Amino acid sequence: MQRLRRPVRNQSSRGGVKPRLIVLHTTEGHNRQGTSDLEGLAAWFDDPASQASAHKGIDAEGNVITMVADSRKAWTQCAFNAVALSIEQVGFSSTSKRDWIVRYHRGLRTVARQLAHWSIRHSIPLAHSTVRGVCQHKHLGEAGCGHSDCGPGYPERYVRVWALLWRQRFLWASGRPRTRRSRAIAAWRKRRLHREQRRYAGRVLGTI
Ligand SMILES: [Zn+2]
């Protein structure tokens, strides 16, 4: 997994407004091995002609690119831009639920981690909401530009539950003295977390 940083020109001030909504998108573009897909996305968002941008881009391999700082406004969901943090996932809204979970698993993992980080940093709940929480672009309707991503197959609940587990883990890990015992407990919690994640993935796959 690689982390890239490419600040883009298409961004502006939030005007003092704090983010309270995390919005998930799909790029409607193909995933490519390596980070050229994310570099291409940043180049498009750096072009003033596109008049578009997002805070983060994440591809199917779990690589992540930061294009706009959290404190700034990215341009991707019209009237909601000032209050939103946005993630563009490389992929299509026509992707099935099974493909999301099987083929895009590493990408979803990075998305869940990002949601957990933002949830802690900006006190945003990981519940589904179009006011304060997490949603997809399609939930914002006309005021949000009237788009249909991430499509009907996107496993939003799966990603949010995964993010909740990551958030727990990040909170446990922070502010604790690093003794042998605490490391052993952290390792045990990590194994338990992975077990829960696998069990949850199995349940979701079983219901498709
Ligand atoms: Zn979108």
Image (cartoon, helix red, strand yellow):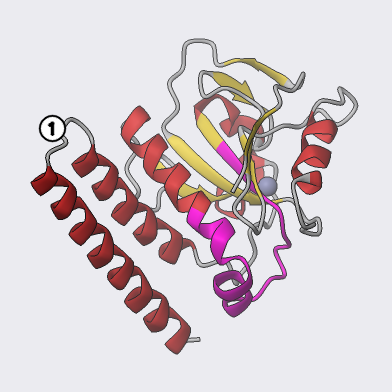
Q: Which residue is outermost to the right?
A: 49
Q: Is residue 50 above or below residue 180?
A: above
* Residue sitting at x 84%, y 34%: 44
Say what secondary structure mark 1 lies in.
Answer: loop
| x, y percent for residue 172 | 19, 43
The residue positioned farthest toward the front in the image shown: 180
Query: Which span is picked out in magenta?
Result: 86-109
Residue visible at 72% across and 59% down in the picture = 91
Q: Residue at x 65, y 59 (%)?
A: 60
Please give the residue where the numbered disc 1 appears in the rendered image.
177
Measuring from the top left, give residue 146's x and y in whole percent: 69, 48
Give percent across and percent down for residue 123: 31, 32
Instruction: Please name the amino acid that badge 1 sits on.
Output: Pro
Q: Position of residue 182 (x, y in %)?
A: 12, 45
Magenta-span inclusion, residue 50: no
Whether residue 127 is visible: no
Count of numbered marks: 1
Farthest-out residue, left: 181
User: From this viewpoint, is residue 78 visible?
Assistant: yes
Which quarter of the picture shows residue 38?
Answer: top right
Would you say the beta carbon of the disc 1 residue lies within 8 angstroms of ligand 1?
no
Image check: 174 left or right of 34?
left
Relative height, residue 26 to residue 65 (above, below): below
Q: Quadrant of residue 173?
A: top left
**Drawn side of residue 53 relative to residue 30, left or right:** left
The crowd level at tag 1 (other Cα within 10 Å; few <14, some 14-19, many 20+) is few
Looking at the picture, tell me which residue is in the foreground, 67 or 194.
Answer: 194
Magenta highlight on residue 104: yes
The residue located at (47%, 43%) in the rendering is: 114
Relative to residue 174, is residue 120 drawn left or right? right
